[in-house]
Amino acid sequence: MRHWHAWPNALVVTYVLLGWPAGVWLLTLPALWASVLGVLLTAHTLVCSAYLLHDCTHNLVFPGAWANDRLGALLGWINGACVASYPDIKRKHLRHHVDRLDVVTFDYRAILMQSPLWLRRGMLALEWAYVPAVELLMRVLVIATPFAYGTFRERARVTAVLATRIAAFGALALLSVRAALLYALAYLLFLHVLRFMDAFQHTYEIYVSRSPAPAPPDTRRNRQYEHENTFSNLLSERHPWLNILVLNFPYHNAHHAQTGVPWYRLPSLHRTLYEDPGIRTQVVPFRPLLANYHRYRVVRVLAADYGSVARDESRASAFIGAVGVSFLTAI
């Protein structure tokens, strides 16, 4: 039995809806242990809210689309994805599956290359210092785009959402500036977790489009292409429970193989798919990817592609990875 009748979904929904405010409350306490626990709890519930939202876009939490969409919109308010409308997030993510491309509304690389040199160097310096500047830029672009290309209604919606979130953050700062700064730290940790997952799950082409229409058809982008350019970046194969920390999102090849399988059933699907040792090249170990996340943190910002994955033991060495492709920054 799947969807809401499955206890894993009930448990995660409860954890996010109760754990996130509990984490914020801990940030307001003066004790060091409360600050550390609050940052970790807030960051982790934000991560879970994002991946639960992802399952909502595939209608995998509740039996019907309406309930999934309502929960997805609520989760977007928690993790900040609410600046873009939930229907747009859902539509853009499903295009990623149908078009077999990384579909983005704007090419941040082109924007940076056309920007003043000081701004480009500043962005690269922030990335060198482990500040996820590109992810923050993408969120600024999500805010700015309706004012450049959108309708009056879209601009009014973004203004209202932004005013509400600024007021909420301001209220937290009035209560405790320290708590507000710790929340910002938790949010940066959340962004790092999401971008690490996103960085090493595809070697797709990037398709820039503001149109809701499908990408032009290409016979190269068939199911085999999808399989060969999709990777499972498991946190651990020896200890599968660790992957639950990110709601099994690292079982990404299994997710693309059968998008109707909820997060808690992906490990068993993964085991079925990879019974044949000959196709395990799609599973890329965690340690070399963590090293690449560090090594290529500046290079990947302006890299022309995501690099390549070989079939030998050192297959991850040239895997630069993606940046700026989060399903939360779609409009």
Image (tube, grey):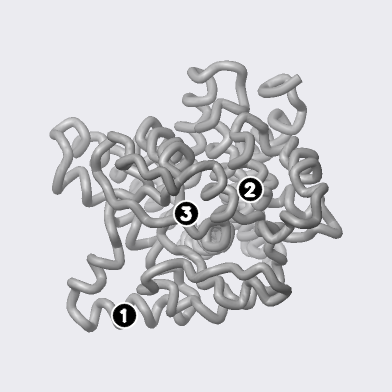
Residue 145 rendering spot, x and y as whole percentages: 22, 48
Amino acid type, callout 3: Leu
Q: Say whether residue 151 is left or right of residue 193.
A: left
SS at badge 3: helix
Task: Give the Cα distance between marks 2 and 3.
Answer: 45 Å
The structure residue drawn at horizontal position 49% and vertical position 46%, both measured from the top left corner, is 79
Disc 2 target residue: 253
Quarter of the picture holding the C terminus: top left
Disc 1 target residue: 122
In terms of image quadrants, where is residue 100?
top left
Contact, mark 2 vs mark 3 (Cβ under 8 Å): no
Q: Is residue 119 visible?
A: yes
In terms of image quadrants, where is residue 284?
bottom right
The structure residue drawn at horizontal position 41% and vertical position 43%, both measured from the top left corner, is 219
SS at badge 2: helix
Residue 101 rendering spot, x and y as whole percentages: 42, 49
Amino acid type, callout 2: Asn
Task: Give the Cα distance between marks 1 and 2.
Answer: 35 Å
Label 2, residues with CA under 10 Å away: few <14, some 14-19, many ≥20: many
The structure residue drawn at horizontal position 69% and vertical position 61%, both measured from the top left corner, is 281
